[in-house]
Image: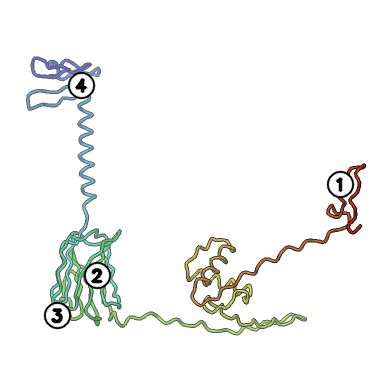
Amino acid sequence: MSWTENGWVSCAGSVPAARKTETTRAAGGKRRMGDRHAIARIHGRRVLECRPVRHIMRVLILLVSALLSSAVAAQTNRLTSARLDGDVLRLDVSADPQAVRHFPLPSPPRVVIDLFGIDRSAAELPKPPQGSSAFELRTGEHADFLRVVVDLRAALPSYQVRQSEGLIEVGLGSGTLPPSATGVLIGESPDPGSLSAPRPVAAPVVDVAVEAAPGARPAPAASPVSPAPTGSELQNLDDLTTDELLALIDAELAAAGLDQEQSAEELIEQVEAELAARPGSPTVPEEPEEPEERAPAREGDPEDRPPFRFIDEEPDDPPGS
């Protein structure tokens, strides 16, 4: 690549720069610019004439468009401001949330507002005044929503939540929301303190008559199962049956958090160690091992045989001779 007399740049394999001021005639007779060369002005005077310039410009355009797309996609929806006017909480957001979920909690009394589609909070939360129903505001960022929690001084008779464009309004207690032409009342909740868990209802007992087969005896009534004794109530492990010992092992595992994947021998050893370590638990003394009884010598045993002697050796004199 070199500079020419008229201020052009010529690349290897390109048409001479001096002739690029005019169009070239193709084989079909049409007038068009050279297909293999790109022309770009430098400082308004010089022209760079080279095939790679076109590819570089395309890459730059693609990079710029990708950066712009990522910047638009990375733009987060935020909670921009939070205001507390008396007992009316107003939350300003940069974009409308996808959904708004709200519910009260009784202990301690508080109201929770989940703003789905809002990523984070950039608002400075106000400090409620002394006469307000709320005494603290706080936020928490989750994966797909922003949670706003209003801690209350006492349980409220009701509260209201209304959504309008870029605004979420929450009326606490005496703070009745003013009428709005554009806002939509999401819901109104009763007193959080009056909410109680539903009582379990016992299933009705239905008597079903079963016809007994001829010659079949009625099944004996199941005997009541006594509760498994705990480790503190035991006096000796030898007094337990197999079922009671297994029930004790299950109870000790649940209380001590032992590993469920251990073998039965290891579990029993750990239970015995736990019981022995507890104060007031009697220890079971180990019985001494009995000496091994030796079988009486039978006739013809090596111990009853006379000692070895040579043929010409005189036998020992018997005792007392």
Camera-side residue of 161 and 262: 262
Q: Give, as a three-letter code, the residue at label 2.
A: Val
Q: Earlier in the sequence, mark 2 or mark 3?
A: 3
Apparent side of residue 284 relative to residue 114 in the rendered image (left or right): right
Apparent side of residue 123 relative to residue 289 in the rendered image (left or right): left
Q: Give, as a three-letter code, the residue at label 1.
A: Phe
In which quadrant of the rendered image does the C terminus lie?
bottom right
Apparent side of residue 126 relative to residue 253 in the rendered image (left or right): left
Neighbour tally class for label 3: few under 14, some 14-19, many 20 plus, Cα within 10 Å = few
Q: Residue at x 22, y 72 (%)?
A: 150
Residue 149 is marked as 2
Q: Give, as a three-letter code, the residue at label 3.
A: Gly
Q: CA distance from mark 2 to mark 4?
A: 68 Å
Please, what secondary structure does the residue beneath circle 3 have? Answer: loop
Q: Position of residue 13 (x, y in %)?
A: 22, 16
Q: Position of residue 19 (x, y in %)?
A: 14, 16
Camera-side residue of 77 and 258: 258
Q: CA distance from mark 4 to mark 1?
A: 125 Å
Q: Name the residue beneath numbered marker 3.
A: 131
Camera-side residue of 46 and 105: 105
* Quarter-of-image position of residue 10: top left
Please, what secondary structure does the residue beneath circle 4 have? Answer: loop
Residue 308 is marked as 1
* Quarter-of-image position of residue 41: top left
Q: Residue at x 23, y 46 (%)?
A: 70
Q: Disc 3 vs disc 1: which is toward the camera?
A: 1
